[in-house]
Amino acid sequence: MNGSESTFEDLCTELLDGELDAAGYAALLAMLQSDPGLILELQRHLMVSGALCRENPAYADDRFAAALSTHLRQVGDEPEQDFPNLVRRRIRRQKLRKIAMAMTACLALAAIPLALRSPAGTAAPAVAVATRLSETSGTNARSEEIPAGREIRLESGLMQLEFENGAVVAVEGPAKFRVASADEIELESGNLNAWCPESAHGFRVSTRSATLTDLGTTFGVSASEAGDADFLVLEGEVEVSVGSELRTLPEGMAVRATRSKAFEELAFETTPFRRTWPLTSGILATTGEVIPAPPDTPRKVADYEDDDHVIVIPERRSFLLPDRLAADITSPGRYGDVDELPLHGPGEIAGGNGKRARCFRLRYNPVGQLEYGVFVSFEGSVTFDRPILGIITSARKLDRSDRIASAARLPNTSEPHRMRGLETGPLTLSDSLALSEDRRTITVKFNAGESVDEIRVITEAR
C-alpha cells in the first residue's frame, strides 16, 4: 500500500476500535469528502467488525483467527496482506477491547454520511449522468446523476452513462456494475460498450479476471457470472492486463480473460453488442424498417449492404464545423410529399467559434443492384440523443460533405453523384421525411430504385 492508503487503513482501524481522536476523525472525513469511493471501503471495514461482534466470544481465539484467514486466502483473489490479514488483525485487537467499543464505533460510522453532506444538504458530486431506456422505446428515458461508488443492478433494458471526461458507456441488462470513479467502471456481470474520446484516454473497465485500459477507442466488454470476461475492439486500441501480463489489442481483435489468470484467443464476434453499440454511438431508438448498422469496424460498416432495411450508420463522432455547412433541411416539419416542404433547399448550418458536431448516414444500399424500373419502399424512424442541426438530402451536398463528415472509406462506386441522395420526381416515386419538433427524431419513407438512397444527419456533438 502507498502512504495515503495506509493512513486511511489506520484511521479506519482506530475508528472501529474506539480510539479515533478529534484530529483523526477530521482527517478521515476529509479523505471521504475528496474521494467518495472510500465510503464503500469504510463500509467494508464495518461489515467485518460488525460480523465479528455478533459471533460467540470464542471469536477472539487465535486458532479461529488463523483458520478464518487461511480460508479467506483460499477463496479470495486479494494479496495475502490485504483482506485476510485485515480480519486476523481485527480479531486479535478485539481480544483487548470490549464489544461496547465496537458498538460505539458503529454509531460513529453511521454519522459519517451525514457529516459528508454540505451545509445545503447536497449529495456527493456526480461523475456521470445515467439515462435508463425502457425495453420498448428509447424515447421513454429517465436520467439521473451518478456519484462515484454507486453500485447499479440493471435487471433489463439499456442504460447510457455519460462521464464528465467525455466517455460514453452503454450497458444492457441483466448486468451488475459499479461506477468506481470518474474514469473507471467495475463490471461484475453483463455486456457493455464504451466510446472514449481523447479527453477520456485511460478510462478503465475492471472485471474479476482482467482490467481494460482505453487508448482512444470503441470497445466491448462481456463479463460472465463465473468471472471470465471477453474484450473486443471495434476501433482504435486498448490494453488488457491479467496480473503481470499485458496485451495490446488493435481494431478487429478480441480475447478472453479467465479466472485462472490466462488469456485465450477469441473470434471477433460482435453479436453480443448489437444493442449497446448503437446507444454508445448516439442512437436512442429506431422503428419500422430503419435499423442501426451492426457493430463492427468502420470499414465494414461503410461497406454494409442490406436488401430489407434503411441502415443508420454512425460517421464522425466529433468534427469542427466550418463557418457554413450547406444543408437542405434545418427546421422541424414534413418534407417531400405533395403540399409539403421541398426535400432540397438552400439551408445551411452555422459553425465557427470552435463549434463541433457529429453525423450519421441513413442509407438504403441493397446487395447487388435493383433492376431498372423496380422500386421498393421503406418506412421507419430514428431518434438520436442530441438535437439535429441539419439534414443533407441532395447528391452534390452529400459529395461536398464527405470530406469532413465521413469517418471511414466510402464504398467504391462508378455511379454519378446524381445517384445519391433522395429523389423528388416527376420520373420517380418521391421520397419523404419529417423532422420532429424536438429535433431528435427523423421519420423517413424511401422509395428506392437503381440509386442508393441516403441522407446525412448532422447533430450537436457531446
Image: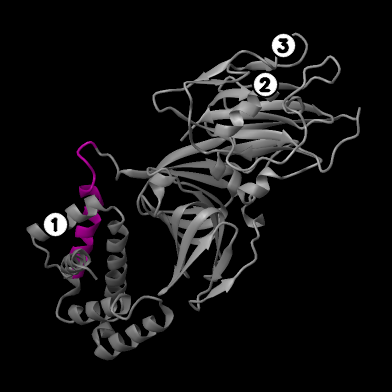
Q: Secondary structure at mark 1?
A: helix
- Residue at x 67%, y 43% (from the top left corner): 302
Which label sits on residue 27? 1
The N terminus lies in which quarter of the figure? bottom left
Instruction: Please identify, in this view, whether the residue under mark 1 or under mark 2 is nearer the observer.
Output: 2
Residue with the mark numbered 3 = 340
Q: In this image, 129 relative to 2: left or right?
A: right
Q: In this image, 4 relative to 348: left or right?
A: left
Q: Which residues are magenta?
A: 102-120
From this viewpoint, is residue 314 visible?
yes
Render colour scheme: one colour
Indicate which disc, 2 or 3, sits on the residue closer to the N terminus: 3
Tell me the crowding category of disc 3: few under 14, some 14 to 19, or many 20 or more residues within 10 angstroms, Cα based: few
Q: Is residue 328 above or below residue 46?
A: above
x and y percentages locating residue 13 in the rendered image: 19, 69
The answer to whether residue 276 is magenta is no
- Residue at x 59%, y 48% (from the top left corner): 277
x and y percentages locating residue 109 in the rendered image: 23, 59
Q: Residue furthest top?
A: 339
Q: Is residue 13 above or below residue 158?
A: below
Q: Is residue 206 above or below residue 364?
A: below
From this viewpoint, is residue 294 visible?
no
Which label sits on residue 434? 2
